[in-house]
């Protein structure tokens, strides 16, 4: 590290930020990729239905497809806001 | 039967054509009959990197449409024996690469050659999918940069689900990582993803690391595959990568930053 670098390094190193962003993104993309093609559309529509009744954010709905032996398990995780209901 | 190798990346400008030219040249130099095929229909460029742009008469699509024979379209390299180039067409017709046509041409080439190197276009459109479909092995060219790593992962997903080997339940395509435009100095400064970071994210075998090098542009300016520039860092890194591809074990080079003098350490960037 040089003198200039010493002052620059106060910020978080960008390579580390890049790695963390990629790890999250790649994990998410792999999960949707391995699932059936309709998964993203299903997620969209579920979100629409839920929004009829409560106000939730785009990322409040998590869909995950897991395999357990012979079964595929569709896991649906919806985070409701504290004061739901419209 | 030839081994079909696709050079792919998803993202453009990461060094697919440079790598295709280097790999094909290296394989031929090692004594294997090799043909390198440009799948980038509409944007032919492999001929320029190989330095045979003035000798292209017939191209891949002409052979598919049976307007020319393979022998008429194959361009024999003037420097390395056992090396041939099949240029891409400049047609703007996206559907020029038909499934049957590509299969037939690759089948015919397979009888004559030991290796068929397929230079994939960027993106995941038809040309790229066709280049990947028949592959036995894939070299995924990646830059240590977020968009390139993401696209490489996307391409790996396609290889493992949409390739012929995947569709027919054969042994999967052997995937190799080639990290290009690597700058050890910037990795050391924490400005660039390191080799271990990229390996951890993509999780495939490492074929080699090609350092960021002036030699690559110089070689392409002159139409010489950079692997023939034997005195250069990039040339040597490609030689190592090809040797590894052929099963030889070689230590990885050009991974450490050059040591700087006192002046450089104080004021260098």
Image (spheres, grey):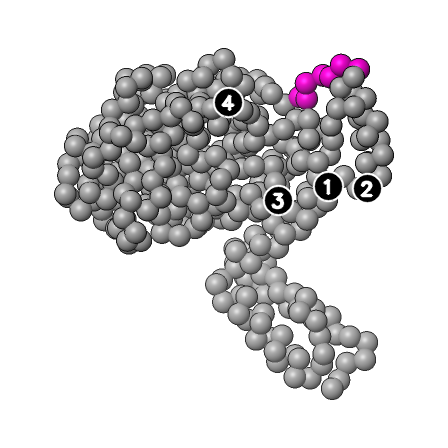
| Quadrant, the N terminus of chain B | top left
Residue B146's label in the rendered image is 3
Tell me if residue B105 comes above or below residue B195 in the rendering. below
Write the start and end of the magenta stretch as one range: B256-262
For the point 49% across and 62% down, the residue is: A36
Dot 4 crowding, Cα within 10 Å, few <14, some 14–19, many 20+ = some
Tell me if residue B111 comes above or below residue A17 in the rendering. above
Q: Nearer the viewer, mark 4 or mark 2?
A: 4
State whether residue B207 appears in this view.
yes
Give x and y (percent) for residue B172.
Answer: 43, 41
Give x and y (percent) for residue B186.
Answer: 68, 30
Towards the viewer: B135 or B233: B233
Q: To which residue does mark 2 refer?
A: A11
Q: Are marks 4 and 1 on the same chain?
A: no
Query: Magenta stretch: residue B257 in it?
Result: yes
SS category of the residue bearing label 4:
helix
Dot 3 crowding, Cα within 10 Å, few <14, some 14–19, many 20+ = some
Q: Are marks 4 and 2 on the same chain?
A: no
Q: Are marks 3 and 1 on the same chain?
A: no
| Disc 2: host chain | A
Is there CB contact under 8 Å for labels 3 and 1? no
Q: Nearer the viewer, mark 2 or mark 3?
A: 2
Specify whether B157 is left or right of B253: left
Q: Nearer the viewer, mark 3 or mark 4?
A: 4
Q: Main secondary structure of the magenta part?
A: loop
Q: To which residue does mark 1 refer?
A: A14
As measured in the structure, the alpha-carbon distance from the residue carrying label 3 to the one carrying label 1 is 11 Å
Q: To which residue does mark 4 refer?
A: B215
Dot 1 crowding, Cα within 10 Å, few <14, some 14–19, many 20+ = some
Is there CB contact under 8 Å for labels 3 and 4? no
As measured in the structure, the alpha-carbon distance from the residue carrying label 4 to the one carrying label 1 is 28 Å
For the point 68% across and 42% down, the residue is: A19
């Amino acid at each position: 590290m040089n003198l200039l670098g010493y002052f620059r390094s106060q910020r978080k190193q960008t390579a580390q930020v890049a790695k963390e962003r990629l790890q999250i993104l790649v994990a998410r993309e792999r999960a949707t990729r391995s699932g059936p093609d309709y998964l993203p559309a299903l997620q969209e529509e579920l979100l629409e239905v839920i929004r009829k009744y409560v106000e939730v954010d785009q990322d409040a709905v998590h869909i995950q497809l897991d395999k357990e032996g012979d079964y595929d398990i569709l896991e649906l995780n919806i985070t409701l806001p504290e004061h739901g209901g419209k | 039967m030839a081994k079909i190798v696709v050079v792919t990346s998803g993202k453009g400008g990461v060094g697919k054509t440079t790598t295709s030219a280097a790999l094909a040249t290296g394989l031929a130099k090692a004594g294997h009959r090799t043909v390198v095929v440009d799948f980038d229909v509409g944007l032919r460029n492999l001929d320029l990197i190989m330095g045979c742009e003035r000798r292209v008469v017939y191209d891949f699509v002409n052979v598919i449409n049976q307007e020319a024979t393979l022998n008429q379209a194959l361009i024999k390299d003037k420097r390395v024996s056992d090396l041939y180039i099949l240029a891409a067409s400049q047609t703007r017709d996206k559907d020029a690469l038909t499934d049957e046509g590509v299969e037939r041409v690759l089948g015919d080439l397979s009888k004559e050659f030991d290796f068929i190197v397929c230079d994939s276009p960027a993106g995941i459109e038809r040309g790229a999918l066709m280049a990947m479909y028949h592959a036995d092995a894939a070299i995924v060219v990646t830059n240590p940069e977020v968009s390139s790593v993401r696209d490489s992962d996307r391409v790996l997903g396609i290889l493992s689900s949409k390739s012929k080997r995947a569709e027919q339940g054969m042994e999967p395509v052997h995937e190799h990582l080639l990290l290009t435009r690597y700058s050890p100095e910037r990795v050391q400064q924490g400005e660039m993803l390191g080799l271990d970071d990229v390996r951890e994210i993509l999780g495939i075998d490492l074929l080699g690391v090609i350092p960021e090098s002036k030699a690559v542009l110089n070689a392409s300016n002159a139409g010489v595959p950079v692997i023939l520039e034997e005195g250069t860092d990039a040339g040597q890194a490609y030689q190592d990568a090809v040797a590894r591809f052929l099963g030889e074990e070689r230590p990885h080079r050009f991974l450490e930053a050059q040591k700087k003098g006192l002046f450089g350490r104080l004021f260098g960037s």
